[in-house]
Structure formats: structure tokens, C-alpha cells
Amino acid sequence: MKKIILAFFVYTSVISCYAQNSKKIPITIEKNVEGAPITMGIPFPEGELYSVDNIRMINDQGNEIAIQTTEVTTWQPSDSSVKWVWVFLFTEKSSNYTLEYGPGVSRKIFPQHIVSTNNMRPQGGITINTGPLEFNIDKEGNGFLDQVLLDTNKNGKFDDNEIIASAPNEKRGTFLDILDENGLDKSRAVIHEVFREKGSGKLHSIFRVEGTYVYQNENNPSPFIIRIHAYAGKSFIKVLHTLTYTGEPDKHKKQEGQHANIATQNEIILSEETMNDPGWTQPNDQIAGCGLTFKYHLNDVVNFATSTIEGDWHQSPSLKEFKLDQIGDGKIGVLQTGPKQNKPGKNSSPTERIEGFNSQIYNGDKVLKETQKSKGWIDISDSEKGISIGIKNFFEEYPKELQVDPKENALSGYIWPSSIDPMSFERKHTEKDGGMLENFAQGITKTTEFIYYFHKESDLQKIKDVMNYSLKSPVAHASPEWYTQSKVYGNMAPFSSKHEEFENALQYKFDWWAFNQKWEPWYGIFDYGDGKNYYINGEWHEWNNNEPTVDFQLWTNFMRTGDAKYYYLAQSMSKHTMDVDNIHWPKKRTYLGQINDAVDYWNYKDEPESTPYLGIGRRHAEEHWYSLLSAHVWIQGWIASYYLTGDNRALDVAKMTGDTYLKRIWGDHDLRGRRLYLSVLNLVELYDATKSPKYKKELDERVEIMLQLQNEQGGNILIDRYGYSQTYVAQGLYKYYQLTGDEKIKKALVDHARWVLNVPPYNHQMESYLATIYPLLLGYEFSGNEVYLNEAKKRAEYLKVDKLPKSSEEFSSQKEYSEALLEISNLPKDEGGRFTNWETNQGLRVFGWTHANNIPYLLYWMENESEPEQLSKNQQ
């Protein structure tokens, strides 16, 4: 009896201890489809979690499900606790889950796992076995999938008769063909290395394939990256292909020297007065075709399936199935085109939407079906097995094509279709843009996402399910309160209807952006994700190119609201700006020492050096590649994308920018003014994500310069010219203080708050004046003096807006929507009677300084003004 009592006591003690040592986070999955692979980023408050092993996921039935966790970053150097975690899972029917964590939590070991080998010897390659699927990529192979086998008899083995796909000939599994005055130059793909990416594990593994397209003519070689996501127990893979355009975009006469805006010397400065050179508007190297392809191994009788979208391109999708029982000898596929391919300037009017979208299902020369918009997938199957392929954003990132060639047994996905006019990058005019006359298209990249599903039976519903959750992935998230209370982005309030006049100011502007994306529309292979800045007389002007951290504004709004539509907007903006709005080439490879021969290093040393502009951003302009500036790159949103979605490319591109900071190519110009303020914001985010000492050293030195300059400026951290840069300084230094606890930073932020309280900046008028709201709030947080909060609330009175008469979806035209926004605005007019770029119906550029980086923090302190955060910290 005593043993029974003792056992019961031990059992109840364990249960009690477990209950005390575990906590729960409700998780919701929006737009859920059963079986979808999900990677979600979850932040944790400082000191809350010390190991990702102490996390598990419970479904709505109370049962634990298999997950994979990755520690992304920690609170170091302040604390060793975990800051961001990636949680990977396959969804079930329910959209509701519970994440349990704590020192008493441990996970079950589930049997599913991926088996892979990575042998990068000259004759090597990678082989991945997910259970039902095995595929390999050979280092000396054809650049993409060299062999794919499907376990059709379910015996756990892969026999030669189970090959379902194999490589084409001539190293053209992936291709980027160039057309110039010498004719078509077909590429060959050469693979150099394959790496396992962060986030790989038993359930989900990511392989980064690095290679180069080489040419017979004198065209520049072009690097490519293919990221392949494999999933345990699944026979589909996700493939992200990143091309780099390395061609000469036009035929203008090249001159020696640099433009004044981006000069790294002053000996040879280029003239901007070359408008008479006709070569600016003459195309040179054009993209004639780009994509991925392989040979399929199916029986002679092959059927074809896809789905079409009926109605006008801007309407809610009405899907219809399309099936063909047997394909003939002619090529069959789906081609999506649109009205602005190489024809900029075509847009909707304020009252009428543009026409010109076209989607064709074709077979040879015959058009089988014609609509305006395609879903973006096709399937080919025989009686036993089949292959489906889809391209994400097939319509939004037009032109695109999916094609079957029965004569060659080829299945191809085209990033830029070979069947249409090539993509050219010549200038459309010779007017200066941002004070410059140049063409910076060389070095642009573009990442395209594919899904490949190798299946046994031709179950159309299952195929559609896989395509649906792959082409528009479900969005998993915690509650808005969890993100804001984690403090990873400081004292930010979750969405609430309590202060409707301020929330309206935020939500109406983001909804206006989303409305215009679909009205103008802001679509196309190199445009999608971005939007324009200024709405003047019914026309939009200047691509935004991410100033100031537009994608971060959208990520913040997703975390505050939990609304999936902001997730999609943020993700597309981050992907666009890290690809298109950056210089990626020429880039010297990183030396890894993976080859045994010592001569490999000396060969590497002899390779051409990278461009000094590697990683710098593009200035807002009428075309993405017309103008650069020495302080025009924002990585904060890329890092948020990395944390929230598991996008490894985001961190890669951010590091490229960080490495350019280390070079200080602009001398002291790089360490003054807006360049200094923005570099601190960027570097503190990059250091937080990587914990790399080289970024910490550079960050420390730049922060010290900022503090020295503040002493010379009477307490003002900023020089007057850049008053709108308040948020760069405040957010950058605040995060630096979070990580280091350096008391000098706290004092500097209070001194700066005192300055903007007493000497409010009016350069750029409302852009600068309203940008001071956040610095004033930091003054209140660190001092407890209500004068700062009261002044912040006073200045924020301009931001309040009334309620719109109807929702965004109910407005019949852009003109009607714009007029309604102006009716509810309380923002002042320009003092000189000029165009007001901060008005409610404008884009997200000035909005970042006036609203987006202020209101979420203002609402926090309006709810918590009785106890500033710093006072509560001092009491601990």
C-alpha cells in the first residue's frame, strides 16, 4: 500500500511539475488544406525558452503531431534564450493547434524521415529519399533533376522500372537563353556545389544548388541558384529557381568613370548629358527563354489536365476543370501573357481597368481554351502514374508557360517563355531619373517558385489539393498578442478597435495599396510585389523599391492583425525587393576549400573581383533599374521574412548588403547622414540574425560615430537635412540597446527625444515632423516623463481618420476610392500649395515615416502609459 501511495505521489508530482514547466500558444492556420507543408516563425520573449527541443505541437484532438524545430536566433548578447524558432509541420483537417513549450516539454520521436547523401566530388552529386520518392542531381549532370524514381509498388525500394523522370540532353535541365545581334545563344548549365540549408531536418530538408549558365558566344556567364525542398513521406518537391541577368541591357556608348550619386572616387565622374546617344533605347542582350525541364517516363497513352479561371482577370476566381484523355504529337500546354510585357506605361485608368490578359490552353497550333487568367498548373498521367507541375504567381508574374512536348517526352516550366517575344532591358527614354541617366539592369535577379508532384494514381482532387496549398500556401500564425508581447520589435500594440481613428489610418492605407495592386495592376515578372509612390491627377508615379522598409510595414501589420492577406503582400514585396531592387552581379564566389588540390585557391584568387556596388539598392524611379543611390537598401523586412517564413534567400541577400558596408566604399560619406542612420538599422538586424562578430564590430563603430556626432549637434542625433530619418535612428538604436543593454544608448535616445520635443524638424514638412512620434515615445519609455507621451499624442492628432463609408472591396473604381480617402483625412496641406506626398491617397513611401513606424508604438503607450517599460525593468 505504501508503494502505491508513493507511486501516486511521484506521478502527481511529475504531472504538477510538467504543468508548471509548460506553456501554451494557440496556433491558427488560415486557408488550410490538409497535408500542406508549413514553416512558421515564432518569436519568444527574452528568458522564456532556452532550447527548441522543449517544443511540441498538439492538434485539436489533443494528440501530438510530428514537427521539426530550428533555432533561428537568440537574444544574445543580452541573454542566451531563444528569440526566433522555425516550426515545420504538415497540416491536418483542423485549422487550430496548440504549441506547448517549456523545460518540462519533450517531443515524441516519429518514424517519418528523409534520407539523403551529399557528395560533391567531381563524379558525385546528391541523392534524396523521402520514402515514396527518390531523386538525384549529379554534379556533372544536366543542371536540374537527373533521375526521379517513384515507389509505385510500395515495397520501399526503387527499381529501374520505377523511373518517372530523367534529365534532358546537353546540360539543359535548366536554361537561360540569350538573344542579341549575333542570334540565339543557348545556355548550358554547370553545377558547382550543393549545400544543405538551415532549416533542414527529418521532416523537411532544403538543398541549395549553385551553378552557372555558360554560353558559346561572348555572353557573360550567369550564376543560378536552385533551392529544392523535400518532405518526408511525400512525393512532391518545391523548387525555387533564382536567375541572374548578366547581359548588356542596351547599346549605349560605355564611358569610363562613375556617377556622382554613387561615386567611390572623384577623378572620373560620368556626364549625365548623354541623351543624344540612341543606344540607350536599343536592346542588346535579351532573355529569349528561361526555365526548368526534364524527360517524363510514362506509358504511350497520356492524358492531360489543368484548371481554368473563368471571367475577367480582376474578378474572384471561378475554377473549371479541363481534361484531355489523350495528348497527340503536338506540344500541349498553358501560356499566360499580359498587357505590359516590355511595354511600360500601360495601366488602368482611374475609372476603367486595363484589358489585355490572355491565357491559352493549346495543342500544337490549335487553341483548345482561351480565358484571361490561369491557375498555373498542369498534370500528365498514364493509367498508373503521373506528374503535376505548377508555378506560384503564374498570373501575377506573367508571362509564364507550362508545356508538354510528346515528341521529346519533355515537361517544361518556363520562367520566361521561349514562345513569345524576348524580355529586353533597354531604356524606354533618355530622361534623367533621380538625376541620373543610366541602365542598371545588369545584376538583377528573379526567384520563381515551382511545385513538382510525382504521383501513383491519377486522383484529380488530390492533385488539385497539392497544387492549391503549394501555389498559395496556408498561413500559420500565433495570436497578434503573442507577437507584440514577445518584444522582438519593441513595444508594439496588437490590432484593436479601441482606438479606431488610428487603426483606420493604418489599415485603410494598406488596403488602398492592395486595391491598387489589383487595379493598375502592379503585376509582371519584375514588378509583382512592388507598388508606386505618388498618385497625381489619377496616375501613379515611381516604383517604390522598398523605401522606407515597405515590406517591414506589411510584416508588422501581419503580426499585429493575424490577417493572411498582409502576409501575402509582405512576402511578395520582400521577394521582389531582395531580387529586383538590388545589385547581385558581378559577384566573386566565396572560397570554401571543398577541392583537395591547392591550386583551387590560386584559381579562385585569379577570378574577377565583385562589383563595388554589390548589395546596394535601387532608388525609387520610373523603372526599377534606372537609378541607384548610396543609401537606398532596407534589409529589415528581409530579415522579418527570414524569421517568419523560413526564407533562406532573404538572409543571403541581407548578408551581401552587410558585407558591402564592411568595405566602406564611399569613405566618410558612408558614415554620415542618412547613410549612417540607415546602416545602423540594417546592421543591427543583420547582427541579430547572424550573431556574426564582423557585423557587430562594424555596428559598434557606426553607433559610436552616431553618438559622437550627437554630442556635436546639441543632443540631436540627426542633421536637419534628414529629419524624416527619425525611425532609422530610433529603431536601430533601440534594438541595439535591447541586445547590449548599453546605458549610453538609453541616454542618447532620451537626449534626442528632448531635442525633437523642443526643436521639431520641419524640413520635408510632415515627413519629418510626424516621424518624431516614435522618438518621443522612446523618451517617455526611458525617462517616465509624461511630457514626451503627451507631445507624441498631440502630434499624432494629424494621423486620425474617420471611418470610410464602405470596405475596400466595395469601391467601384480607383477614382471613387481615392476621393473617399481624401474626405476622411486630417493631414495638413503643403505650406507652399504644392503636391502633398503624405496625403492619405498616396503610396507607402512617406507613409512609413509618418504613420507605419509610429502608430503601433503610440497605441502601446496609450494603453500602458501608467507604467513605462523602463520603469518596470528597473523594479525587477
Image (cartoon, grey):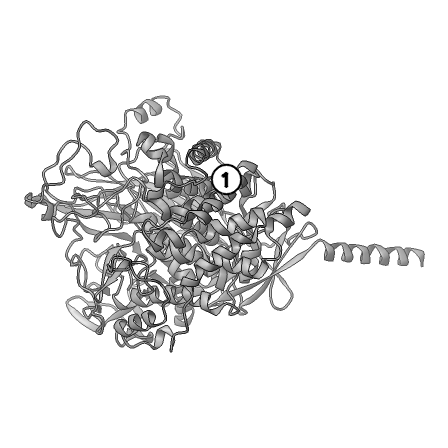
Left or right of 279, for residue 290:
right
User: Is 297 rendered above or below residue 348?
Assistant: above
Q: Quadrant of residue 327?
A: bottom left
Q: Please state the horizontal and vertical placement of residue 751, each as a whole percent of the image.
A: 50, 42
Q: Is residue 310 visible?
A: yes
Q: Amino acid at mark 1?
A: Ala
Q: Residue at x 65, y 45 (%)?
A: 874
The reply, left or right, for residue 537 in relation to residue 457 is left
Name the side, left or right, on which 191 lies relative to 747: left
> Residue furthest toward the right?
1
Which residue is pictured at 41% across the width and 74% down the height? 803
User: Where does the image place residue 92, in percent across and percent down from the top left?
Assistant: 53, 66
Is residue 489 in view from this perspective?
no
Label count reads 1
Q: Provide the residue designation for mark 1.
A: 748
Q: Residues within 10 Å of mark 1 (few under 14, many from 20)?
A: many
| Quadrant placement of the N terminus | bottom right
Against 492, is 354 above or below? below
Give whichever of 534, 91 is nearer the camera. Answer: 534
- The local secondary structure at tag 1 comes to helix
Q: Nearer the viewer, residue 361 or 649?
A: 649
Above/below status of 142 relative to 18: above
Closest to the observer, 9 or 767 = 767
Where residue 186 sits: x, y (%)? Answer: 18, 45
Q: Residue 538 is drawn in which quadrant?
A: bottom left
- Furthest toward the front, the residue is 758
The residue at 35%/74% (across/down) is 809
| Front position in the image: 623 or 270 | 270
The image position of residue 590, as x and y in percent, is 36, 32
